[in-house]
Image (cartoon, rainbow, N blue to C red):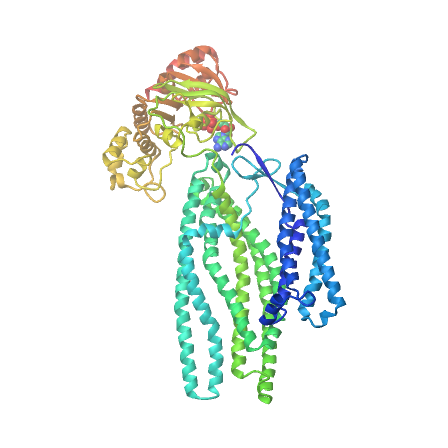
Amino acid sequence: MEGNRAYYTLPLFRYTNFVRFLVFLDGVVCVALWLAGGRTQYLEDNVVHFDFYRSVFELACLSLLRMCLLFHFFTRIEEISMKLLDEPYDRGLIKKRQAYYVSAIFFTLLSTAYAVTKGVFVLHEESYKEMHSTYVAVCIASLVFSVLELLLALAFLRMARRLQVMRIVHRYNSDGQEIDEEGNTIKKKVNLRRLFVMARDEWWILGLGGIALLVSSASNMMAPLFFSFVVDAALTSIEKVNHTVLVLLLIYIGGAIAAFFRSWLFTLAGMRFVARLREELFAAIIKNEIAFFDTTRTGELTNRLASDTGVVQNTVTVNISMLFRYLLQIVGSLSIMFVLSAKLTGVLLSCVPIVSIGAVVYGKYVQGIQKAFQDELATASTVAEESISSVRTVRMFSGEDKSKREYNVSIDKSYGYGKKLALAGGGFNGIVGVVAFGAIVLVLWYGAKLVIMEKEHPGTGLTIGTLTGFMMYTLNVAMAFAFISALYGDFMKALGASERIFELLDRKSEVNISGGKVLDGLDGGILFKNVTFTYPSRPDNEVLKEVSFSVEPGKVVALVGPSGGGKSTIVSLIERFYDPDSGTILLGGQDLSTLDPRWFRQQISMVSQEPTLFACTIKENIAYGREATDEEVEEAARQANAHQFITEFEEGYETMVGERGVRLSGGQKQRVAIARSLIMNPSILLLDEATSALDAESEHLVQEAIDRAMKGRTVLVIAHRLSTVRNASEVVVIDKGRIAERGTHEDLLHKGGVYKKLVLRQLSAGHGHVMPPINADTADIEEEGSQEGSEGSNESNGTER
Ligand SMILES: Nc1ncnc2c1ncn2[C@@H]1O[C@H](COP(=O)(O)OP(=O)(O)OP(=O)(O)O)[C@@H](O)[C@H]1O
């Protein structure tokens, strides 16, 4: 798909659909009236011995024909009119439309003429007196529909012109997502159907569960009937009672077994579905580009994985089974109740509209509060997660009270909505209770009246047994209604949750995690050509401006510059965490965006200042990037000066690190991270030297490991140490997103620009780091003479370490 596309649709409530509906009604009404008009013999006679004055068979056929033809004509006229809006001078289309229009009018005119003629003859001959009443109705209906359709057909062209203002435009971007006029993507409409389609793999389990559901529902339906038989049998003989009770018992046992299967199978399907959904959702989340994670809170994502999927799980399985169960229960019970006593059922049904209206109004109100309640709860859990995961920082700044306050604000808000929910729930239950029990009492009173009538005039009322059964069915129906109204809330909740899930599932990552060219080898050269970049999360802040530089294969280039200048951003771009806004980045002479990210990330290793280790064993951490043997892991650890401290742990390489394991020191962590990089044997090494001071011994070990790692590789290092910049082939000074200076350490010192200021500032601070928190613009420059003097002495301080 290339570029934006646009489609038009029409609103549902429009002229054509109204005409279509009428034409459909015409066909159905005329045929139904004709069929309802008598016994089979009579119908046959009507066809075989056709009599123009008395038969209406041809009117029913004519009506069916009208239905088919007019449906087709009107649909085509509308379609052509839509096309003509975009191509108003297409003569072919105009002629076609005229042909359909004339045909529609001609046909409706003919059929009106026929209906009028028939009506006149029927009236004149007074044959309507001998016709079945529904046949007379067919004549009238046919006349009315024909005239109506003729009028509507005449007005159709005029209405077709209004399509221009009625049509709704839908624009789609190149990814196939619907967008609005400003180009923002419009959220896809979610419906439960999509959820059910997703549960495709579970359909067979649901099918089996459905069979069990039918059996258990049938048992539920039959039980009250046999209950009433038992009561009536009690008035006759014990044998009859024994027999009926036995049957009742069998019905209950069968129902219980079916209920077990129903419950097991539907729950199982739900579990399977949610497990798969979680896997898919996690895969969809983790594949997103880094910019997505910059703008989305972790708490929100984990919430979707854990709770939204849980809400959806029940909907497509357990809830849908309950819905069917209760619907069956209502339909089945009401049918049996009709058979038992139509009068009593009529009394009961008269109460239903009152309860239903109340349920709908309540449902709408609760839905709104429920959403607000969930939103506040989600905010609260995000606050909680952030505070708990950064508990050290919280403790450091004694921020417990602040975190508590933030959490409490959200919880208090959600409690506010919770209070409203509780009141609404209570009120509804109370009111529905009064109405529902009122209805039951009414039915009981009327039923008792019928029992008395039966006693006085047998055959006119109800037996006690039937009334008992009837009351049980009434309770069945009432319970089913109550559960269905509760299910309605669950379905609404699931709709909300599925909307959030689908939003993530449908999201297309702007930077794919795999796919693209794989080269035979990588020579390690890096080239930045006029790269400009802005973080998507901060669109008004251009971080890199027209940056161009290169790193020759096998060389070491040092990036230096004031904090916030854009050094780490350059490294992120090489890892293709983000794509530049303009300009190109070449890796081994190839445009980075054409290379397979999975492949080139194997060729690049990065060691950052504060590496993150996963909550698993040291061995697993070192072999995170690829499968490796124990020997390879050990060798990498030796190279990284980590072997010794690892073997000093009781469990050696199997020692758990991270949240629930041992806490490694900063230097140890760095060395494990270096081993993790070395095991990949990368062509390119991206290094962010530590600014945080390690103790001398630790720094020495880390530095030694880094020096070893750098050998024979292309290295881009964000340098903080003077020794590093001195040994680099080139130093690139990045200041406010631009390259301020480039050259060797000596060249740049002689130049006397930003770099020199940085070095002097650092040296005057008395340590060998070249970097933050210096800001070149504000750095005070010491007197030239004293600077030169101090430079020499301090420099050696810096490099001797
Ligand atoms: N993920 C991000 N989203 C938005 N802005 C960011 C992001 N990361 C960095 N920035 C901004 O980009 C600018 C450059 O940041 P960068 O981390 O590249 O600087 P740096 O030179 O590496 O600084 P330091 O030496 O302090 O690490 C800064 O203004 C920073 O606020």
Q: Residue 642: image x %, image y %?
A: 28, 32
Residue projecting furthest to the right? 124
* Vertical position of residue 420 compared to residue 537: above or below: below
Q: How many marks?
A: 0
Q: Residue 755: image x %, image y %?
A: 45, 16
Query: Which corner quadrant of the image does residue 440 belong to?
Result: bottom right
For the C terminus, the image quarter is top left
Of 260 and 546, the residue lying toward us: 260
Residue at 53% of width from left, 46% of height from top? 406
Of 89 and 51, the residue lying toward us: 51
Q: Residue 681: image x %, image y %?
A: 30, 28
Query: Which corner quadrant of the image does residue 318 belong to?
Result: bottom left
Of 723 and 528, the residue lying toward us: 528
Residue projecting furthest to the left? 631
Of 196 and 428, the residue lying toward us: 196
Query: Which corner quadrant of the image does residue 457 belong to?
Result: bottom right
Q: Can residue 158 be seen at all in this image of the molecule?
A: yes
Q: Can residue 644 be seen at all in this image of the molecule?
A: no
Q: Residue 423: image x %, image y %?
A: 59, 61
* Vertical position of residue 398 compared to residue 684: above or below: below
